[in-house]
C-alpha cells in the first residue's frame, strides 16, 4: 500500500504538483537528516547538508523513470549519497588558502593562537635567574655558601648542620639568616 501511494505521489510530482513534491520530500526527510549527520564537508554545516540532501530528493523525483524495476526509495537514497560524495570530491579539489601564518579578522596569526605547554619567556627568565643565582652563590664566602647548599639543595636540617659544625642551633639559624642576607645583596 505504501509503495502504491508513493507511486501515485511520484506521478503527480512529475506532472508538476508541488504538494506531491513536498509530501515526498517530507517522507524522505529522516533519511536525508541521517545521511547528513554521517557526512562532513569542509565549509558546510548540518543545515547546508540537509538542504543539499533535499535538493537531491527533488532532482531524483524529476529524473526517476516510473517504469524502472528499482524502487524509488532506493533510487532516492542512492541519489542523495552520490550527491554528497560528489560534493566531497569537488571540495577536496579546492585549494585551501589557510596556513598557520594566515591572519584572522583581528589581524592575529593562527600560529600565535595555538596553546603550548612550553612557555619560552618563562623558561628564559628562569634560566637567567639560575645563572644570576649561581654567580651570586660564587661570590659568597665558602662557609655561607656551604650552609645554603646544605639547607636548600641537600634538604638537610639546621640541627644536622649545627651538630656537624659543633655550634648551637641558634647560631646555625643566625648564620643561615646572614648567608641569605648576603646572597640577597648580591642578587639585587
Image: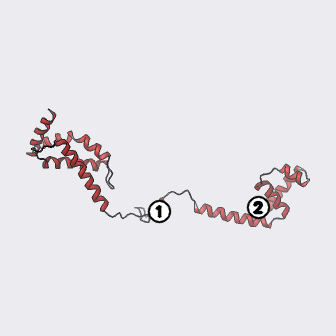
Q: Residue at x 23, y 41 (%)?
A: 29
Q: Is residue 188 visible?
A: no
Q: Residue furthest top?
A: 1
Q: x, y percentage for residue 83?
A: 23, 52
Which residue does the numbered mark 2 point to in the structure image? 184
Apparent side of residue 45 relative to residue 24 in the rendered image (left or right): right
Apparent side of residue 139 relative to residue 55 in the rendered image (left or right): right
Closer to the chain start, of discs 1 and 2, is 1
Q: x, y percentage for residue 8?
A: 10, 38
User: What's the CA distance linking mark 1 and mark 2?
Assistant: 40 Å
Apparent side of residue 136 relative to residue 107 in the rendered image (left or right): right
Q: Residues within 10 Å of mark 1 (few under 14, many from 20)?
A: few
Q: x, y percentage for residue 43?
A: 33, 55
Q: Residue furthest right?
A: 166
Q: Residue at x 23, y 48 (%)?
A: 80
Question: SS of the residue at dot 2?
Answer: helix
* Vertical order, 35 against 151 (above or below): above
Which residue does the numbered mark 1 point to in the structure image? 111
Q: Residue at x 48, y 58 (%)?
A: 114
Q: Quadrant of the N terminus?
A: top left
Name the residue nearer the viewer: 183 or 119: 119
Q: Quadrant of the C terminus?
A: bottom right
Name the residue nearer the viewer: 47 or 66: 66
Q: Residue at x 9, y 42 (%)?
A: 11
Foreground: disc 1 or disc 2? 1
Q: Residue furthest front?
A: 69
Amino acid at each position: 500500500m505504501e509503495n502504491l501511494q508513493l507511486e501515485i505521489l511520484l506521478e503527480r510530482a512529475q506532472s508538476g504538483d508541488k504538494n506531491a513534491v513536498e509530501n515526498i520530500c517530507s517522507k524522505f526527510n529522516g533519511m536525508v537528516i541521517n545521511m547528513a549527520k554521517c557526512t562532513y564537508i569542509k565549509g558546510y554545516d548540518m543545515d547546508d547538508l540537509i538542504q543539499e540532501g533535499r535538493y537531491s530528493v527533488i532532482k531524483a523525483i524529476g529524473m526517476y523513470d516510473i517504469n524502472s524495476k528499482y524502487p524509488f526509495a532506493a533510487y532516492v537514497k542512492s541519489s542523495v549519497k552520490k550527491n554528497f560524495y560528489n560534493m566531497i570530491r569537488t571540495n577536496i579539489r579546492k585549494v585551501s588558502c589557510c596556513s598557520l601564518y594566515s591572519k584572522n579578522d583581528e589581524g592575529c596569526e593562527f600560529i600565535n593562537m595555538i596553546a603550548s605547554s612550553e612557555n619560552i619567556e618563562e623558561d628564559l627568565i628562569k634560566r637567567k635567574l639560575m645563572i644570576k643565582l649561581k654567580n651570586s652563590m660564587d661570590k659568597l664566602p665558602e662557609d655561607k655558601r656551604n650552609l645554603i647548599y646544605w639547607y636548600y639543595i641537600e634538604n638537610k636540617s639546621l640541627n644536622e648542620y649545627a651538630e656537624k659544625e659543633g655550634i648551637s642551633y641558634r647560631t646555625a639559624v643566625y648564620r643561615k639568616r646572614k648567608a641569605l642576607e648576603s646572597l640577597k645583596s648580591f642578587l639585587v
